[in-house]
Image (spheres, rainbow, N blue to C red):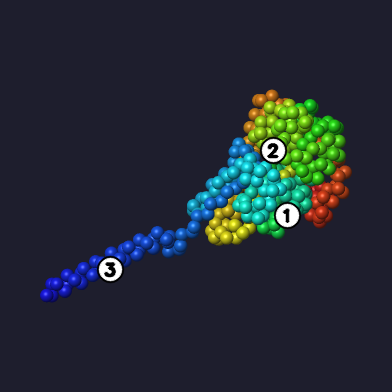
Amino acid sequence: MKKKVIAAILAVAMICTGLAGCGGSKESESSGSDGASKEEAKKITIAVPDPDASYIYQAAEEFAKRAEEYSEGTLEFTISGNGSLYGGDTAAGIKQLSAGSLQMLILASSVYASFEPGYNVISVPYMFDDQQQLLEYLNSDIGKELMNRVSDMGITTVGSWTRSFRKVTSSKNPINTPADLKGMVLRVPNNALYVEFFGACDAVTTPMNFSEVYNALQLNTLDGQENPVDVPFSNKFYEVQKYISGTNHMADAWLVGMNSTLFDGLSDKQKEAIQKAGEEVQQWNVEFMDEEDETALQTLLDNGMEYNDITEEGRQEFIAVSQSCYGKFKELIEDDELFDTTAEFCGKN
């Protein structure tokens, strides 16, 4: 009898041990080693305006890789190029990001000027001397306040990256001075600041969606366009343009935006991962552009385009045209204090 009681006790003990083991296994599936609940993975799509060969597509990939790593796999990103998610209409893209039908969008700060005129200050011709000065500005209190103005639209800025300065491409002649632009039919973004400056250079400015530019150049409806060197490279403008001129006339920046409702709904760890990736890719992008600009320009030359740098005298002529427009630029920016503090920061006051 005694042996039967002992056997029964042992059997119950074994059953309890098994149940405890099962309970422990179940807990380990829903908890980390420290007992914290495992975060739910978020899938996020990043829309960019250019094709997968472009700088910004590759910068978006670098951002995604780092953010996924820092979130320990709780964030998963997909990159969508060519502006396909918003039909190539950047204004529509910004509205969709604000409403939440786009999750993340990387666009030039100049495009946002249609919604917040202050962004025009970055693109005042010849305001910034070089990439380093632009980078320092974006990281200054002035620059940070500006890049965060989209918060009123329900957009959170998670990265502020520089772009290569803009150059003019043309089919008729190289550009060395403002006089070389006289009568040239030039595509510019749908932005009054660009229209004002190039109009002052006596160009015939033609705002149009970028998706239409290649065909217009091919049909000679346009004589030229202006963009950072990666744009004619990635869009094969060497097929429809002869000259590329180192005017370096305007700066621009990439605003890496995320829908604020989506961002606010992330865990602290996921937010930190995104912000850390955004900060790190800023410098990565500068170094990447330095290398890739050389490759892009060489590709254009290898495919028949001709390149010319403008002289210091030519540059001063362009600067004089820009400064003659400062009054109009201030009206477009609608923020005299921002213009003046930016000019002071850049030594252009």
- Closer to the chain start, of discs 2 and 3, is 3
The alpha-carbon separation of the residues under discs 2 and 1 comes to 28 Å
Q: Residue at x 69, y 52 (%)?
A: 95
Point out which mark residue 16 bears. 3
Image spot of residue 88 (x, y percent): 67, 42
Indicate whether 90 appears above or below 14. above
Q: Residue at x 13, y 75 (%)?
A: 2
Image spot of residue 252 (x, y percent): 72, 44
Name the quadrant containing residue 82. Answer: top right
Indicate whether 212 appears above or below 77. above
**Crowding at mark 2 (Cα within 10 Å: few <14, some 14-19, many 20+):** some
**Crowding at mark 1 (Cα within 10 Å: few <14, some 14-19, many 20+):** some
Q: Amino acid at mark 1?
A: Leu
Point out which mark residue 189 bears. none
The alpha-carbon separation of the residues under discs 2 and 3 comes to 69 Å
The secondary element bearing badge 3 is classed as: helix
Q: Which residue is mark 1?
A: 146
Name the quadrant containing residue 48. Answer: top right
The alpha-carbon separation of the residues under discs 1 and 3 comes to 63 Å
Badge nearest the viewer, 2 or 3: 2
Badge nearest the viewer, 2 or 1: 2
